[in-house]
Image (tube, grey):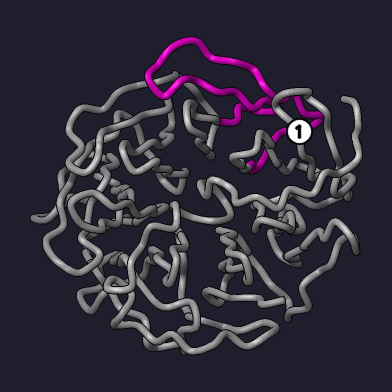
Amino acid sequence: MTTKTRVVTMAAVLTVGACGGAPSEEVSQESAPLSAAAAPQGLTQLAYGDVTGLYESTGNLYWTKSGTNALGEQAASFMRMSKTNPPGDEVALYTAGAPGSYTFGNVVWALADTYYGYFSVTYDGRESGPRRPATSGSEIIRVPLAGGEAKVIATSPSLIGTRDLATDGTSLYWEDATGIRSTPLPDGGTVTTLAETVLTSHVGLDANSVYFEAGSLIESVPKAGGLRTLLVTAYANITTFYIDANGYIFWGEEGGAVHEQTLDTNSVFTFQNPIAGRNVISVGLDGTHTVWIDCAEPSNDDCQVRIYDPWDGTFTVPQPPSTGANHLQCDSTSEYWSDQTGIKRYVW
């Protein structure tokens, strides 16, 4: 790989993937019920509990969590809160429970005839019950963000688990255990297989293509279907990546390295060289800064959130010891992520 001088891109990014959420089309009426106090500088705890997916919008954060209900069953919830939420003020938009393993995965939102949240649910049929089938599987559920009835819009051919979802507002894209899938929004229905894959967890979008990682490679396939294109060949297995609208791919690797590559010239810039015993968990861009999370492996502890400033270099967010950090999201002023304690925000 060749190297290049870092070019600072000040233009807005297409906010899909790890750091940004959906396009900023959300209106005030959606977030009006939630608090909107000014965000203090530094590190703040926004919510507590297990987090299995996190996605930002103009004024709010949406996430999924898991736990146990009063019946002793596995329970999962789709949640909403403002970006300045005091813990305890968050709102559950949808909750469901069932015997055995029943978990919600990653989440996105999109505007159709109204605002909807979309998230995956994966269930383990080894323990069947009156509210679940007797087989394992994964589905995509749609819930109105203003409240209302949940609807299953797609059944995935293989298990999704905590793999990524992404949307361009017209279609929903996701990875399951055997392929890259899509379904039309808002109502779903037909599930289209865009590529057959294994050992993939992340998906990203630009105007025309769907991107996914496979081992040490990042590939793309047209949204309408077609031939796969190889874009990145890394030195180690790719653990996370992010696509922006200006023709850059950011990715992290097993072993702690973080890189950026331009799609037009294939020039590579390295933000962080390999660090023995660390893996990169999540990576993104807030418009000015490249941001990533890396953790010690195999324990997934000693997690650090690092912010690369093009003028001042890399800054590590000061925080207490953190385990299981993941689900990095960003806007122009703040970084958001989850760890074993819940959801955190850091304001420059």
The residue depicted at 80 percent of the width and 52 percent of the height is 278
Q: Quadrant of the N terminus?
A: top right
Question: Which residue is tagged 1?
Answer: 261
Q: Quadrant of the C terminus?
A: bottom right
Secondary structure at numbered mark 1: strand
- Residue type at mark 1: give it: Gln
User: Eyeballing the image, is 324 above or below 184?
Assistant: below
**Residue 283 visible in the current orientation:** no
Query: Quick one: label 1, few (<14), some, or many (20+) residues within 10 Å?
Result: many
**x then y, percent, for residue 313:** 90, 60
Identify the residue shown where x is 48% and y is 32%. Answer: 207
Q: Which residues are magenta?
A: 212-241
Residue 321: x %, y % from top left = 73, 76
Residue at 68% of width from left, 85% of height from top?
41
Question: On the image, which quarter does residue 326 sit in?
Answer: bottom right
Q: Pick the residue in front: 51 or 123.
A: 51
Please state the horizontal and vertical placement of residue 113, each as a whole percent of the image.
Answer: 18, 51
Q: Is residue 37 magenta?
A: no
Q: Is 267 positioned to the left or the right of 293 in the image? A: right
Q: Position of residue 306 (x, y in %)?
A: 77, 63
285 relative to 74, above or below: above
Q: Write the residue at 31% across / 80% down.
A: 32
Asked whether residue 137 is in view, the answer is yes
Tell me where residue 115 sits by quadrant.
bottom left
* Vertical order, 141 against 246 (above or below): below
Residue 237 is a magenta residue: yes
Residue closest to the eye, 289 or 138: 289
User: Magenta residues: mostly which secondary structure?
Assistant: strand
